[in-house]
Image (cartoon, rainbow, N blue to C red):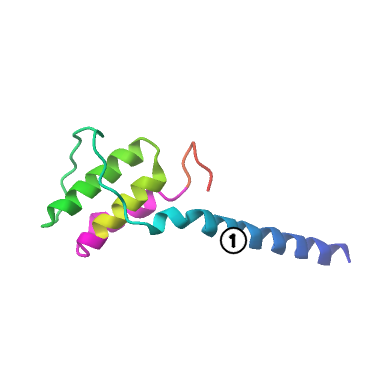
Amino acid sequence: MNRILIIIAVLVVAAFGLFFRHSNDSSSNLKAPLLSNLGSYHFAITTKVKLAQRFFDQGFILAYGFNHAEAYRSFKEAARLDPDCAMCYWAQPTCSGRTSTRRC
């Protein structure tokens, strides 16, 4: 009987965890704004779309500033603007996982 209650409790906690994780992630569905005054760092990627390069640079700066949610949105917007840009897709999971200061 105790084993069944423990299994049910674990399933309920896991279901709530998944629900809250996805419900709080709604900001990543919005298009990223192009921000100003973030600095002039540039990491050249292979793209013909200048705006995609700007969003990638913005995402890189935001990721190094530990603003992972905005960085993810910037990388996602860069990938939307240039679907052939591999680096835009590579960068998305780098800011959506665990870090030393963020526990997902």
Q: Is residue 47 above or below residue 38?
A: below
Measured as percent of width and height from the top left, residue 15 is found at: 65, 63
Question: Would you say the magenta stretch is mainly helix, strand or loop?
Answer: helix
Q: Residues within 10 Å of mark 1 (few under 14, many from 20)?
A: few
Q: Residue at image x 26%, y 43%?
A: 58
Residue 83 is a magenta residue:
yes
Q: In the image, 53: left or right of 12?
A: left
- Residue that badge 1 annotates: 19
Q: Is residue 91 above or below residue 66?
A: below
Q: Which residues are magenta?
A: 80-97
The quadrant of the picture occupied by the N terminus is bottom right
Q: In the image, 77: left or right of 22?
A: left
Q: Residue at image x 29%, y 48%?
A: 33
Give the total number of marks visible in the rendering.
Answer: 1
Measured as percent of width and height from the top left, residue 44 is found at: 15, 46
Question: Mark 1: which secondary structure?
Answer: helix
Q: Residue at image x 58%, y 56%?
A: 20
Residue 87 is a magenta residue:
yes
- Amino acid of disc 1: Phe
Instruction: Tell me where residue 6 sits by quadrant.
Output: bottom right
